[in-house]
Amino acid sequence: MAARKPRKEVHTVPTDKGWANRAKNNRRISNHRTKALAEKAGRKVAIKRHALHIVHKSDGSVATKRSY
């Protein structure tokens, strides 16, 4: 059986200064003042990368997951 590729992920997470999008390796992709702007940007990146977009709540728990 062929080995599976690691799944690409984009996380929309809260930060001290607003919201950020981060890659699976915790590398910052973008920063935003509002969650809505961060989600929109994260969705675009996830679509481009054919990745899983994971949106977190302000407490850090997972709110939604969408695969693109």
Image (cartoon, rainbow, N blue to C red):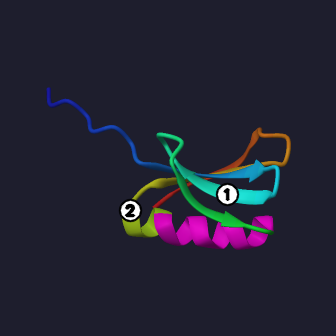
> What is the secondary structure assignment of the residue under circle 1?
strand
For the residue carrying disc 1, how many other residues have a C-alpha within 10 Å: few (<14), some (14-19), or many (20+)?
A: many
Tag 1 residue: 20
Tag 2 residue: 49
Spatial CA distance of label 1 from label 2 is 17 Å
Residue 29 pos. (x, y %): 53, 59
What segment carries the magenta color? 34-45
> What is the secondary structure assignment of the residue under circle 2?
helix
Residue 40 pos. (x, y %): 64, 73
Q: Earlier in the sequence, mark 1 or mark 2?
A: 1
Q: Are marks 1 and 2 in contact (CB under 8 Å)?
A: no
Closer to the camera, 4 or 16?
Answer: 16
For the residue carrying disc 2, how many other residues have a C-alpha within 10 Å: few (<14), some (14-19), or many (20+)?
A: few
12 inside magenta stretch: no
Q: Main secondary structure of the magenta part?
A: helix
For image coordinates 72% across by 73% down, the residue present is 37
For image coordinates 39% across by 42% down, the residue present is 7
For image coordinates 79% across by 69% down, the residue present is 33
Residue 20 pos. (x, y %): 67, 57
Tell me the quarter of the picture where residue 48 sits. Answer: bottom left
* Residue farthest toward the top in the current orientation of the protein: 1
**Of the residues shown, which amino acid type is indicated by label 2?**
Arg
Closer to the camera, 67 or 47?
Answer: 47
**Of the residues shown, which amino acid type is indicated by label 1?**
Ala
